[in-house]
Amino acid sequence: MLTISAPSASMSRMGTVKITDFEGIPCFSIPENSETRNGLPLHGMTISELHNGDSDELPPVVWNFKESDHNAPPVLMPTQCILYGEAPSHTTQRTLKPLELLKVYSIYMRARHDGSSMMGYTGKFCIKPAGSGRTIVQVIPEDSRLGDLRYGGCKK
């Protein structure tokens, strides 16, 4: 008897973090859709410097936090925004360093329902000077077809 079976693989998905500018400081949230409309358990978030790919070292973490109680993580609603450096209630902050101008940062947000194929949310951004001592947050598009042009003067 010959048995043929298709390979089984779970399909994990990554969403895109919604990054907004709040007076020159990045603010992070989840997109609003059918999966997130009632909020998602927030297990943690990590923001790292983005390397140019020539290094074997792990990128330096500039900010991260995790839930204080794995069995009762805070719930993040699409209408909420986590301002850089302000860890949500019921989380434990591990690292916090100032963001540098024109440096590209990568974010990974672990927000998901148990059993969901969505593993979390990612994105890239940088902080740019805006004149008169102000700064603005520039979101780096995911579309890699744009090559280095998508970084708009920010340095990876």
Image (tube, rainbow, N blue to C red):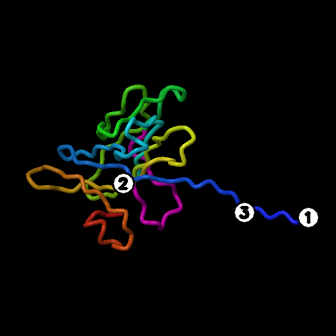
Q: Residue at x 49, y 63 (%)?
A: 55
Residue marked by disc 2: 105
**Quadrant (top left/top right/bottom left/bottom right) for the C terminus:** bottom left
Give the magenta-colored segment's residue range: 49-64
116 in relation to 128, above or below: above
Question: Reading the chain from its start, which is encountered first: label 3 or label 2?
Answer: 3
Closer to the camera in the image, 101 or 3: 3
Closer to the camera in the image, 26 or 13: 13
Q: Please give the label number shown on residue 1.
A: 1
Magenta residues: mostly which secondary structure? loop
Residue mark closest to the camera, 2 vs 1: 1
Tag 1: residue type? Met
**Left or right relative to 8: residue 26:** left
Residue 3 sits inside the magenta stretch: no
Q: Secondary structure at mark 3?
A: loop
Neighbor class of circle 2 (other Cα within 10 Å; few <14, some 14-19, many 20+) is many
